[in-house]
Every structure is written in structure tokens, then in C-alpha cells.
Amino acid sequence: LSRLLRWRVRARWYAAALLPAPLLVTTVLLALSLFSPEFIPGIVTTDNKIALLLFGIGWGLLGGGFLEELGWTGFAVPRLRLQYTAFTTALIVGLLHGTWHFLIAFWAGGSFSGGQWTTYLLGIVFFYLGALPAYRVLMVWVYDRTASLLVAMLMHASLSASTLILQPPLTGAPFLTWNLTLTAILWVVVAAVA
């Protein structure tokens, strides 16, 4: 509970938690939109911007940030850090987190694949087993420096909200391209931080 209530951290750590996801997602989508209009962020093309914004933030905070991080960062990370480096801990938790979501996405794949199972499967592999572990490395890095579960929750919420609000493509080659590009850029960011 003390880690959850630890909110008095420097503003730069809140910035480090809240800004990378929307900046990365927006940058990747806008760069890819130069090649195809399918990558134009959903918040730009939707008629109901307020509803999309509220849903994304609400789901990001409750479903992603708060509930999941109680387990991942509140429980698993501190215990694994007793035995492993921050990087190894992040990979373990990131792969577990990614596998958990991969299984859900695979199960729901009939609805989202658009009949293109190969590109859908590759896309979810890249995102859940590539991008999420990379993002988890950044999350563990921030958590190690703040010891604030709240900051980790906000960082997770930021990624969830960004993908829901900016709505990258969900099917076909654009889905695969988006996930591959995001994964590659996240690992470049991890390398730069390291």
C-alpha cells in the first residue's frame, strides 16, 4: 500500500510515465500515414472524439493501469528484483504480461483477423511478445527509480489509452506493419535508455 500511495515523485518521472506512449504511438502512426491513409490516428477520423477520448482514458486507467499493475508491478516486479537485474525482471514480467494478452487476442482473433489469420497472428506476436516486453523494460526502469506503483499504473494506462484513442489499424498488412514498426522503435528506445 505504501508503494501505491507513493505519489510524491519528481514531475519528470510523471512525464517519463505519461508521455512516451502517446508520443511514440502518434509518431509511428503519422509517419506511416505518409504511405497510407489507413494509419491516420482514429481520434482524427472519428465523429465522436469526446466519447473515444473518455473511453480510452477510462479503460486505460481502470482496466490496464490500475488493475493489472497491482499484480505485475505491485507483486511480481519487487519479488523478481530480489533475484534478478531490472532488465531480466522486465523481460520475465513483459513476456508473461504479453503472453497473457496474446492468448486473449488469439482467442478473439476470429473477430479481428478480417479473415487474414497469418498477418493477424504475426501482428499480435510482434505487439504482445515484442512491444509489450520492450515497454515493460521502460516501466521497470521508471519503477526502479521511483518505487511508485502509482507511476507504473499511469505508465501502463498511458499505453492502453494511447492505443485505444489513436486506434492503429486492426486488420491486414497495415496491422502487421504498425505492430512491427512500433516494436522496432520501442526496442531502439530501450537501447537508447540503456
Image (cartoon, helix red, strand yellow):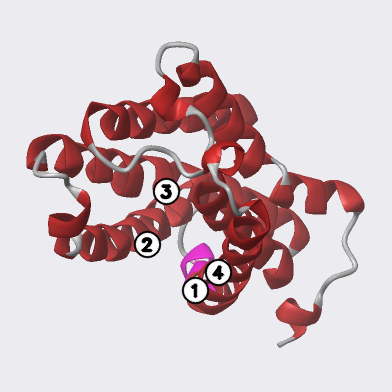
Other-residue count near label 4 (Cα within 10 Å), few / some / many at <14 / 14–19 / ≥20: some
- Is label 2 or label 4 in front? 4
Which region is colored magenta?
A: 75-82
Looking at marks 1 and 3 on the same chain, the residue that comes earlier in the sequence is marked by 1
- State the image quarter where residue 143 is shown: bottom right
Q: Is residue 38 above or below residue 159?
A: above
Q: In front: 86, or 29? A: 29
Image spot of residue 74 (x, y percent): 57, 76
Q: Is residue 116 above or below residue 158?
A: above
Callout 2 touching callout 1 (CB < 8 Å): yes
65 sits to left or right of 92: right
Q: Is residue 78 magenta?
A: yes
The residue wearing badge 4 is: 59
- State the image quarter where residue 125 is shown: top left
Give the amino acid type for the residue marked by disc 3 in the picture: Leu
Looking at marks 2 and 4 on the same chain, the residue that comes earlier in the sequence is marked by 4
Name the mark on residue 132: 3
- Is label 4 or label 3 in front? 4
Looking at marks 4 and 1 on the same chain, the residue that comes earlier in the sequence is marked by 4
Q: CA distance from mark 4 to mark 1?
A: 12 Å
- The residue lying furthest to the top in this view is 35
Image spot of residue 105 (x, y percent): 24, 59
Callout 2 touching callout 3 (CB < 8 Å): yes
The residue wearing badge 2 is: 97
Name the mark on residue 187: none
Per the image, label 3 sits on a secondary structure element best described as helix
Per the image, label 2 sits on a secondary structure element best described as helix
Q: Is residue 60 above or below residue 87?
A: below
